[in-house]
Amino acid sequence: MSVYLHGLSTALPEHCLRQDEIRDRAASIFGRKYPDFQRLSKSFDTAGIDTRHSVVPLSWFSDPHGWSDRAEAFATGARALFVDAARAALADADWESSEVDVVVTVCSTGITTPSLEAQALVEMGFREDVLRVPVFGLGCAGGVSGMATAELLAAGRPGSRVLLVVVETCSLAFRADRLQKADIIAAVLFGDGAAGACLSTETPRSEQRVTLGTGHQKTWPDTLGIMGWDVDETGFGVVFDRSIPDFVTQEFGTAAQGALRAANLDDTRIDRFVCHPGGAKVVEALEGALHLNQGSLDAEREILRRAGNMSAPTVMFVLKSVLGSGRTGQMMACALGPGFTASFLPFTVDAMAA
């Protein structure tokens, strides 16, 4: 039974930070302590990012922070993003919150128990018997893997209404104490954001029909050190290996071919790959690995420019942009995340007759 996308939303927190502001603040924090900062600081200007958003103001990053105040900022900021993204997705689908049967919450940048959908249960107006499915640890692959998980749940319970909410507050993992290159690169790339999606086997009444296929994943053995978190007394510490663009160039094309075979497709039948833009170099590597013309992933670059790498929800921002452009045809969403794992989701977009 087919699963359809009924609603899609994106949300950004209130604090919009310009890349030059972040660069100057990073220089004041890292400049005297990190001898290689001057060389690495050039990445702020070559990252293809103009602005990013954060759940905390720029001044927050100048002070030391531990688990307690990071967790407090997450509880407030992530919950607000959850509500914003969920309400907007429901409005786009023309659903009431009381009609939602399943809520899938994807997040890897903070922890709260009960999880976010429970924290927002009363505010959102979810039913007391709503099925809660919180998912942690998918990282940058969480948008695609989350949609694939929601698709499986919708297909397994025909007629049920599944709400997916993907929330990441990457800014709260900023570390000025470790003085590692990964922390500088994280300061260059990452921002906060959220996205929501409504899925059901019910036939949508919209002018555009998006039909989701079955997701596919590939996890490479012995790659745990490429991406993830270190955890210590201060909080999360980013693991972000410099080999990622080269790894994408060498491995991603083969992984994509496996996903296409699993979906009974080949690359000549894909009208648009919808990719998670991990960074400017990663976008270039994706175009090479997928045999696309350089510059083809224009929506990916535009989202990166406006909001940076928000981890999991970023690909859903790209999806919203592609759907908003009126593109139709056979498409494939794809992302890479900790594991090291490639996640894929085939879908088709049809323009419905008026």
Image: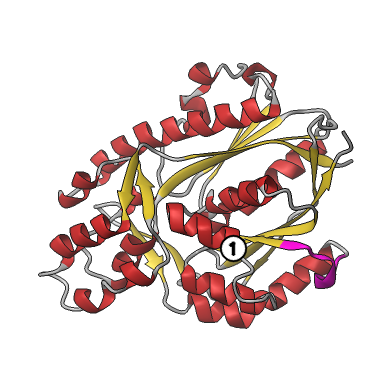
Quadrant placement of the N terminus = top right
- Disc 1 target residue: 298
The total of numbered circles placed on residues is: 1
Within 10 angstroms of label 1, few (less than 14), some, or many (20 or more) residues? few
Q: Residue 4, image x and y in percent?
A: 79, 39
Identify the residue at image location x=60%, y=48%. 316
Label 1 amino acid?
Asp
Front position in the image: 134 or 283: 283
Residue furthest to the front in view is 354
Identify the residue at image location x=50%, y=69%. 224
Identify the residue at image location x=41%, y=41%. 111
- Part of the protein shown in magenta: 265-272
Residue 5 within the magenta-colored segment of the rendering: no
Residue 77, by quadrant, is: top left
Quadrant placement of the C terminus = top right
Q: Is residue 166 left or right of residue 218?
A: left
Label 1 SS = helix
Identify the residue at image location x=59%, y=53%. 318
